[in-house]
Each structure stands twice: as C-alpha cells, then as structure tokens.
Amino acid sequence: MARITLEREGAVAVITIDRPEKLNALTLAMYEQLGEAFAEVRDDSRIGVAILTGAGERAFCVGADLGESIPALTDGRFDISEWDAAHQKHSRLDKPVIAAINGLCLGGGFEIMLSTDIRIASTAASFALPETGVGVVPAGGTLVRLTRQIPHAFAMDLMLRGEPIDAPTAERYGLINRVVAPASLTGTAHAVAEELLGKSRAAMATVKRAVRELADLPYPEAFRREAVLGQQAFDSDDAREGLAAFAQRRTPAFPSATI
C-alpha cells in the first residue's frame, strides 16, 4: 500500500515514503499525507527532531507518479500549489528535519530533500533534476531554493542539463552534509538526531525561524531583526539553564524539551 508513515522513536519522528516497488514515487494522496506528516511533527510537542527517508534500498524518492499527476495537471483537475505543504514551501516547522537518502533522489524527491535541514546520503545515492528533458521545470521549491543553497554554477548545471550526480559530487556541491555506507545510513541519521535532541529546542527553532525570515531582508533590517531574535534567545529559560550547566560542568536540562 502506497503511503507516508510516521513512527515515533522517543522524541524522534521517522517519516517514511513507503512505496518501494515504485521507487517511492508519490501519488497525489501521498503528497497530501507528507504535508500532514510535517504538520504533525510541527504540532506535536513530544517530537524534537524528524528523520525523512524512503522505504527499501533503491530510492529515497523519484518525485511524482507521472502516470497520475501529469493527466491531473494537464486536464486542470489539480494545481501544483497543492503540493506546497509536502515541499514545505510555507512551512512553520521549526524543528530540525534530517534527510536520510538511500538511493535515487530525483525530481520531486530532490525538491523535498531541499526542504530539509541536514542531509545524509548513502554511497548508493544519486541525484538529478530531469525536468527540462520532458518540457517542465522543478517548481516544487527548487527554482527558489537551489541557487540560495549551493553555488550558482552547480545549481544551473543541475537544473538546465538534468544529468545525474553521485553522492560524493552532491557533497562537493554542498547539497548534502556527508556520505556513508548504505549499512550505516540509518544509524548515522539517528545519531545526528540524538545529538540534536541534546540541544536547546528553543534555540534551534530560533535558528530555523531566523534563516527563513532574514534571507531576503536588506542588511540593516536583517541585522536589526537578528538582534531581536538573539536577545529573545539570551533572555530565555533555555539560555539560563544552558549557561548555568556550562558553568557547573553538567549536561543541561533545557526547559523547552519538556514543553
């Protein structure tokens, strides 16, 4: 059964694109479910970090199921903006999202990856944006995000030529954080998640909010807003606990982790 699953492992939510027999291609229903999963992570105070991955060993996600989505789009029965929640275009999810990329990461799957914060890929992973080869464009956030995340020349090569790149090349481009053996992918993602759970949730939320809000502001305005957000963080209960724990050489117990 094609679906998006969300499983809680303590304070870690594992979101899985679960259609391995079709390389985790997303049906219209699965796009909706993915948006709902991100909203659940956002709204559930028990969750501190999310891991996003694909079922099976062959693919993270190859994007939309074209046999379903193309007729719906061309017949006017569906608008691409209905995928916005799955692509986190207008997200207020201020918790870290880790992508564990275990195979093909193409088209819409690539675009969903761009909406995540930390990206770990197996050596078997490959990446491509093949849209121009079939007369469309990667409009699931990529036209906005890609040139803001990696150097212009790399971004334009990926979007214009559509040729696949391997995991080491993706790491060199700055698309992903690290490359690991396939057998180590899940463990590495969970280790990063556990590391993040030891940080201040309030501070991490402020980092994500600031990155989202400040990117397009002129420097003077951005610096003013940064100062406001920074002062709020310094005045927080988490900061008081973190600084006290540092002085006392103990592990902090951040109040935001118990909200």
Image (spheres, rainbow, N blue to C red):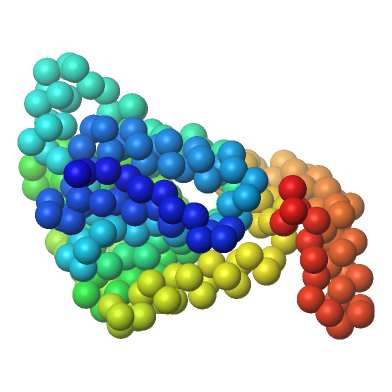
Q: Quadrant of residue 193?
A: bottom right
Taking depth in this image into account, of 123 and 248 the one nearest to the observer is 248
Q: Position of residue 110 (x, y in %)?
A: 29, 54
Q: Residue at 75% across / 43% down in the picture?
A: 225
Any part of residue 190 in sight: yes
Taking depth in this image into account, of 189 and 232 the one nearest to the observer is 189
Q: Residue at 17% across / 25% down in the picture?
A: 73
**Residue 249 sits above or below residue 145 on the image:** below
**Residue 222 sits above or below residue 78 on the image:** below
Q: Quadrant of residue 113?
A: bottom left
**Residue 178 sits above or below residue 221 on the image:** below
Q: Position of residue 249 (x, y in %)?
A: 86, 83
- Give left or right: position of 217 versus 182: right
Taking depth in this image into account, of 189 and 229 the one nearest to the observer is 189
Any part of residue 106 in sight: no
Q: Quadrant of residue 100?
A: bottom left
Q: Position of residue 251 (x, y in %)?
A: 79, 76
- Give left or right: position of 132 versus 192: left
How many numbered marks are there?
0
| Screen quadrant of the N terminus | top left
Q: Position of residue 46 (x, y in %)?
A: 62, 50
Q: Residue at 33% across / 27% down in the picture?
A: 82
Q: Residue at 51% across / 75% down in the picture?
A: 191
- Give left or right: position of 141 versus 244: left
Q: Residue furthest top?
A: 76
**Residue 71 sits above or below residue 67 on the image:** above
